[in-house]
Image (cartoon, helix red, strand yellow):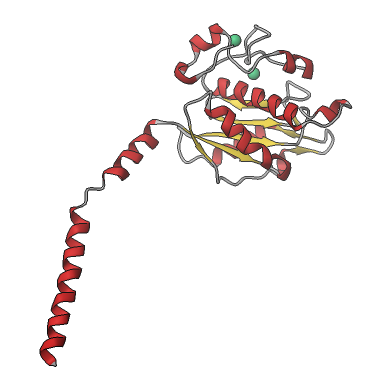
Amino acid sequence: MFTLVWQLLVTFLLIVLVVLVLQFLRPPKRRVDEKKVTVMRNKLYIVPLDEPSRFLVDYLMAKLTSKFDYKFQSGLVARLPEEAFSPTRGQFFCSVILNKLQLLKGNDAEIILAVTDEDLFLTTDSFVFGHADSLGRVAVVSSHRLHPEFYGLPQSNRILKERLVKVAIHQLGHINGLSNCDNPDCVMFKATSITEMDDRQDGFCPRCLMELAIPSKVGKL
Ligand SMILES: [Zn+2]
Ligand SMILES: [Zn+2]
């Protein structure tokens, strides 16, 4: 009886030893490769700043994937900073929002694109559809003035999303070193009204395309 127990114990220990040895021998190739890719591609976080913006994030991510070779990330949580709100204007100040977004960044290579349904302003503009800090690599876009109902027209999520994508591409263009473009068809044209926004395309003009640092995956007009 004692011998049988002893034999079983030795067999069990041998099996454990073989399993452990096999674990050590298996090369961790996959993990190393994944790390390399992460380091080489810039991470882009798309962050909803309020509840109404949440449903737009997946759509933005899908559309921007066809334009930019980023590693898209989600899961970063942020809210509109209260101190960015101007009670007299009823709007949020872009610069304060962008400063706060900078604090969320893990490193310089990361890009944050925040989305809000609130109205935004700058000291130079009474309202903006979006704004980017190209050095800080953070941007905020607003759907507030992109809703057709803002202009007394019937509600349309399709139109809202199409407009928002243009605003997001424009801001990412700034983050990639582009300035506003004087070609009214180009996505980098500074739209100051919803008509100008609808008239411009969601692609870059040939000149902006040439200036872009990442020309490989950027769509054409
Ligand atoms: Zn611009
Ligand atoms: Zn252009």
Q: 97 or 201, which is in the foreground?
A: 201
Residue drawn 61% across the image and 32% down it: 60
From what the image shows, is residue 104 above or below residue 121?
below
From what the image shows, is residue 89 above or below residue 183?
below
In this view, which residue lies farthest toward the right?
Answer: 152
Residue drawn 65% across the image and 26% down it: 165
Residue drawn 16% across the image and 67% down it: 17
Residue drawn 15% across the image and 76% down it: 11
Percent of width and height locating residue 135: 52, 25
- Where on the image, by quarter, is ligand 2? top right
Q: 161 or 80, which is in the foreground?
A: 161
Percent of width and height locating residue 96: 66, 35
Name the side, left or right, on which 61 lies relative to 215: right
Name the side, left or right, on which 135 lies relative to 80: left
Q: Which of the 4 image quadrants contains residue 139?
A: top right
Name the side, left or right, on which 82 lies relative to 205: right
Name the side, left or right, on which 57 lies relative to 191: left
Percent of width and height locating residue 176: 51, 21
In this view, which residue lies farthest toward the bottom?
Answer: 1
Q: 114 or 84, which is in the foreground?
A: 114
Position of the N terminus, as image quadrant, is: bottom left
Percent of width and height locating residue 187: 63, 16
From what the image shows, is residue 186 above or below residue 100?
above
From what the image shows, is residue 106 above or below residue 24?
above
Q: Which of the 4 image quadrants contains residue 119?
A: top right
In this view, which residue lies farthest toward the left?
Answer: 3
